[in-house]
Amino acid sequence: MTGGDMTWTASAATAPDLACPIGPVVDIVFSRWTTPILWTLHTHGRQRFVELERRITKITPKVLTQRLRQLERDGMVVRTYHPEVPPRVEYEISELGRSLAPLFAHLAEWSATNLPKVEQARHDYDSEPTA
Amino acid sequence: MTGGDMTWTASAATAPDLACPIGPVVDIVFSRWTTPILWTLHTHGRQRFVELERRITKITPKVLTQRLRQLERDGMVVRTYHPEVPPRVEYEISELGRSLAPLFAHLAEWSATNLPKVEQARHDYDSEPTA
DNA sequence: CCGTATCCAATGAGATACTG
DNA sequence: CAGTATCTCATTGGATACGG
């Protein structure tokens, strides 16, 4: 290119202090563990803490709590506490969180067609004769 | 919901070991500093190391090199070395990298309409009476 | 069950100085 | 110019144990 099509330049003018208008969203949506959590909440609906813990492999309760609190604060997840014995807490994705659905689908689609290319590129790069 | 619409369930069945099919792509595309770099390369076209360094505020040469190498290895960026004195190196986004354009546009769009809601949610959460 | 508290290891990233 | 080398620090995250 060098000057041709500008497809994602749309809101580039709104750049605040960084040269990247999508920086904030990335921090919110693609922080560590947030995508698996949102994905699980979306595909399995409202569920309890342990269910999430069991479905998201290898996450510790500490980290799960931290991320859920952050997601709740950002309005992506709704936490419902039932004062019983034993206590019961349920998490569900919010309207705002659900608005990410098309975006995630888009991402999954890109992944399906282009992830192999990335892996191919990696292989090619790694097997270069130490140029 | 609890069982209603499933919009991004499409490839959920392909879950490998994690409960999230977009995990790998997130690591590739939304790692730290990669979005500003890709964005800058896309909007300003082919450019040299220093130009990138100057445009992406507050990034150090060490980190910039690391991320560029990773992006090059993943096939998202093409590095061209001109053996001159002083040396000249140019970076440009690849075809594969350019294929992210619609996705980034989508993200920017989501951001424009929903980021205010996130900030509102944060404000609401923070000003709750320590329930 | 649903977390919290504490300690600790690993990774990421800034500062600074230096080279072909 | 285009990095590399070293050092240090801050943040994340894992392991473990415990509490309401």
Image (cartoon, coloured by chain):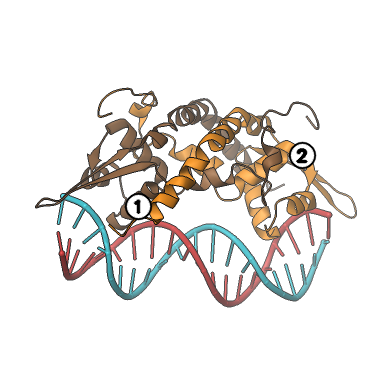
Chain colours: A brown, B orange, C cyan, D red
Chain letter belonging to callout 1: A
Mark 2: which amino acid? Answer: His
Observer-nearest of B77 and B101: B101
Chain letter belonging to callout 2: B
Determine which quarter of the picture holds residue B95. top right
Residue at image coords 63%, 50%: B67
Tell me the residue that label 2 is attached to.
B44
Q: Quadrant of the N terminus of chain B?
A: top left
Q: Nearer the viewer, mark 2 or mark 1?
A: 1
Q: In this image, B101 relative to B9: left or right? A: right
Observer-nearest of B92 and B37: B37
Q: In this image, B7 relative to B115: left or right? A: left
- On residue A103, the disc is none
Q: Secondary structure at mark 2?
A: helix
Q: Secondary structure at mark 1?
A: helix
Q: Mark 2 to mark 1: distance in Å?
A: 38 Å
Query: Could you say where residue A129 lies in the image, as x and y percent from the top left?
Result: 67, 44
Tell me the residue that label 1 is attached to.
A69
Q: In this image, A104 relative to B49: left or right? A: left
Q: Which residue in the rendered view is the most extreme toward the left? A: A85
Using the rendered image of the protein, determine whether residue B114 is visible from the camera's viewpoint: yes
Mark 1: which amino acid? Answer: Arg
Query: Could you say where residue A49 lies in the image, as x and y percent from the top left?
Result: 23, 47
Determine which quarter of the picture holds residue B42. top right
